[in-house]
Image (cartoon, grey):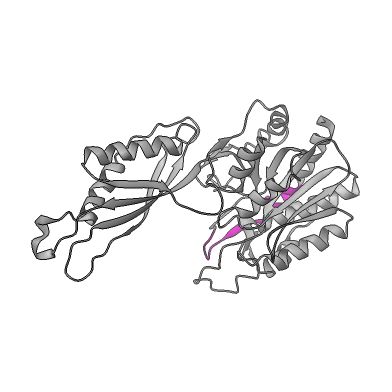
Amino acid sequence: MKTVPLLQKLVSIPSVFPNELKLSQFIEVYLIKMNFQVIKITTDKNRLNLVATNGKSRKYLGFYGHIDTVPPDKNYSFNPFTVKISHGIARGLGVVDMKGGISVILKLAEYAKKNSLPVKLVFGVDEENISQGAHDLVASGLLKNIDFMIVAESGQVKNPSQPLSACFGRKGRFVFDIEVAGKKAHAAESSKGINALEKASLLINEIKKIKLPADKYFGQSDIIFQKISAESDSFSIPDTCSLQLSLLTNSKVRSEFFIKKVCRIANKLNMKISIKPHIRNTPYGESYVINTKNSFLQEIVGKIILPNKITPIYTESVADENVFANRLKIPVLTMGAIGGGDHTKDEWVKIDSLEKLLYSYITILNLYNKHI
C-alpha cells in the first residue's frame, strides 16, 4: 500500500489556509468512492471540514489530520507544490505537516473498507491559524462517539533515528495584550512626564524573571514577547505602550495565575497597566497529557511503541490536539512519520517511516476493534 503517489497528489493541491477547499473536495470524493459516509462541517463558505465514517459501531477509533498548510517559504529552490524524492526522503510543502499523515489516513481508509472495520476519519481546516476547524468539528457533535483519537502529526520530532514519532501531550498557549500607562510631556521636559516605553521595558525585564511552576511533562512554562508598540506625536514622550506576549503553559500554569503575577509586578513598580487575553475567534488551548493508564493506550505501547523502541515526547507546540483533548475529554495520541523542517523550505519526511506509520495504524485499528 504505497503512500508516495497519494502524497504527491495531495501536495500538488494547494491548501494554504484559508484556501483549503480543493483539497477538502478531493478527500471527500476519494472517500465517497469507497462508500464512506462523509459529512461536511462548514467553517466558512469555502472552508470544509470532513467527518467520514465506515461501518456502524457504538463508539469509534478516530484518526485526524489537518489539511491546511502554511504559505510556502519564499526560499524554496523548487516548486513547493511538487514532491522531490532523494535517498528515501520526500521534500515539499506539507510533506510532514501534514499531508504525509493525510496520505496514511486515506490508505488506512482503503484497508478499513476492504476488511469491513468500523472507523471514523476526521479532517480539519485552519490548524495553522487559530484551530477554527477543530472547534467547529467539536461543536458539530459528530465526534461524540469517538472515544480514542489518533492524530497523524509528527509533533516536533526529537529523535529522527526512531522509526516513528509519538507524542503524549502538548503545552498550552495563551496570548496576552498589556497596556502600560505613562504621562505625556514635551520631550525637552521629559522629567515632567512618565515615558510609557521605558516603563514597559522595565516590566518586560521583571516578567522574564517570573519563576513559573514546572511539571514533570513539560518542565518550565515559557514566556515569549512578540510585539511592542509606542509612539508620540510631535516631540513628546509616549504616554502609552502596548505589549503582546505568548505564554506556553504546562499542567500547573493557568492564565488566571499568570495575570495575577503580572499585576503584582506592576504594583511593585508603581506602574499602571491593563492585561487581558488577546481577542480572537476561538479560545486558547490549555495543555494536556494523555492518561498512560488507559487500557487501549497500553495495548498500543505494547504492540507498537515498545517493540519499535519509540520514546514518547511531550512537546512545546500547540495544535488541534489541544482542542480535542480538552473539549472532548478523550485520550489523544499523536503518532506520525519521522520528518522535520516544518514551515520552512527544507520540509522533509522519511518515506519508509510513512509506510511504517500505515502498518502501525492498521495494527492499531485491528487492536481497537478487538478491544471493544
Question: Nearest the camera: 174 or 352?
Answer: 174
* Left or right of 314 on screen, residue 327: right
Question: Nearest the camera: 41 or 30?
Answer: 41
* Left or right of 114 on screen, residue 62: left
The structure residue drawn at horizontal position 65% and vertical position 44%, both measured from the top left corner, is 335
The answer to whether one can see residue 352 in this image is no
- Which image quadrant: the C terminus? top right
**First to last magenta residue range:** 343-358
Q: Quadrant of residue 303?
A: top right
In reply to whether residue 222 is colored magenta, the answer given is: no
Residue 134: % across, % down:
65, 50
Rendered view: 369 above or below 239: above
The structure residue drawn at horizontal position 82% and vertical position 61%, both measured from the top left corner, is 30
Q: How many numbered discs, if any?
A: 0
Question: Nearest the camera: 232 or 301?
Answer: 232
Residue 276: % across, % down:
41, 46
In reply to whether residue 351 is colored magenta, the answer given is: yes
The structure residue drawn at horizontal position 60% and vertical position 38%, both measured from the top left corner, is 326
Question: Nearest the camera: 348 or 254?
Answer: 254
- Which image quadrant: the N terminus? bottom right
The structure residue drawn at horizontal position 10% and vertical position 56%, both measured from the top left corner, is 192
Rendered view: 140 above or below 25: above
Q: Quadrant of residue 42?
A: bottom right
Rendered view: 344 above or below 328: below
The answer to whether one can see residue 285 in this image is yes
Residue 194: % across, % down:
17, 54
Residue 281: % across, % down:
55, 54
* Left or right of 197 on screen, residue 175: right
* Left or right of 54 on screen, residue 234: left
